Amino acid sequence: MSSNNDHIDIELLRRYYNNELSEAGKNALEKQALTDPFLRDAMDGFDENPGSFNQFYEANKNKFRGKKSYTFLIAVGILVALFGITALLKLNKDIHPDLIVEGDSDIIEQIDTTGLNENLAIDIVDEVEMIPAAIETLNYVPQADIVTPNEVVSHQESVAKIIKNQDEEPIVIEEDFNHEEDLTIVDESAHWHKFGQITTKTSYLFDLMVVDYRELKRENQKITYKRFELSGVSADQEGGSKNENDLIEREVNVPYYDYLRKSMSFFADGNYKKALNRYLLILEQYPNDQNALFYGGLTYHNLGKNDEAIAFFDKIINGDIFVFSEEALWYKVKALIKLKKNNEAKSILQEIIAHGGFYSKDAIALRRKL
């Protein structure tokens, strides 16, 4: 696919939305969307409206044949952004005082959507992301303390390599550690027997590992949530009773994996407040969801809510799915230190050192500072 923002490969998108790409192919496209605003906006619109891509494709496929540059999808991407901003300008704050939408207050100019299926465009771009005030008012921790997506990806890659090679090459810590007298014999049955036993099916979204619940049996594979949308109804159609930019609220059901993908896109983009809002909704319906617990814990940490982060990490550590166990224990240490609970942090660091996994060297260095 071209790296230019005004070129979108419609056939690649068709294969993506029809599950014809490999996991690596899907991940590559999702990663590309992080740096391509037109592609990102178009995919966000399609993701929020399951089935809308195929409707769009069928309605316009004759115009796509033999082309690799599509103004139609570019228009969709622009509309996604502009309709969201318009909603902010027209929002009646008295209706939802506990909800906040971030946006731009600049005047929005009209754009030409000639050739675009107007009804479909409205269906694609009408959702407005709402953030409860309880989350919006949280403050980000200093940049140096932020657990970035790149850090998580790097750690996950390293842990995966260690797990793959642990039977062939035992890990040796070549560090002069002078606190052996402070170390205690730990009960490895507590946590460590779990690590390295990742039998649960995983996949990747934006290079970030997730538990693939499509492979696990759940009573329901949907997420139910309240969607805030632009009504798309002109005043003259309703006797002047509605503004075309009024927000309406309706309950919708979307596939879990689609909802997770949008949530992970927010995390990967560093928009932790929007990500946290979605993770909390997932946990309302799936209280032990490992993806929402782990990445929700990281977002809580990044927003300075370390007690909440530890509660999420503990549910992972004490759970029966071990995909994020080692990482959860490490980031729990970080949260404990922020809460000045150094003795508890030291105890966990001892476990990490004794285990000899990916975090062992960092644990030795960190324990020396405490």
Image (tube, rainbow, N blue to C red):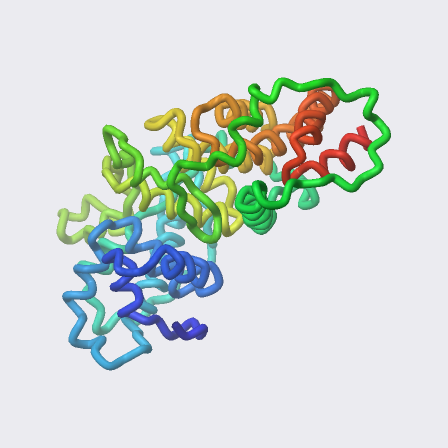
Residue 316 shown left or right of residue 353 in the figure: left
Residue 34 shown left or right of residue 355 in the figure: left
- What's the residue at 57%, 46% (across, down)? 165
Image: 106 above or below 88: below
Residue 249 shown left or right of residue 161 in the figure: left
Q: Quadrant of residue 86?
A: bottom left
State whether residue 152 appears in this view.
Answer: no
Q: In which quarter of the image is residue 72?
A: bottom left
Q: In which quarter of the image is the C terminus?
A: top right
The x, y position of residue 309, in whole percent, is 56, 28
The x, y position of residue 148, in whole percent, is 59, 46
State whether residue 176 appears in this view.
Answer: yes
Q: In which quarter of the image is the N terminus?
A: bottom left
Image: 336 above or below 324: above
- What's the residue at 49%, 23% (across, down)? 315
The x, y position of residue 229, in whole percent, is 28, 45
Q: Quadrant of residue 162?
A: top right
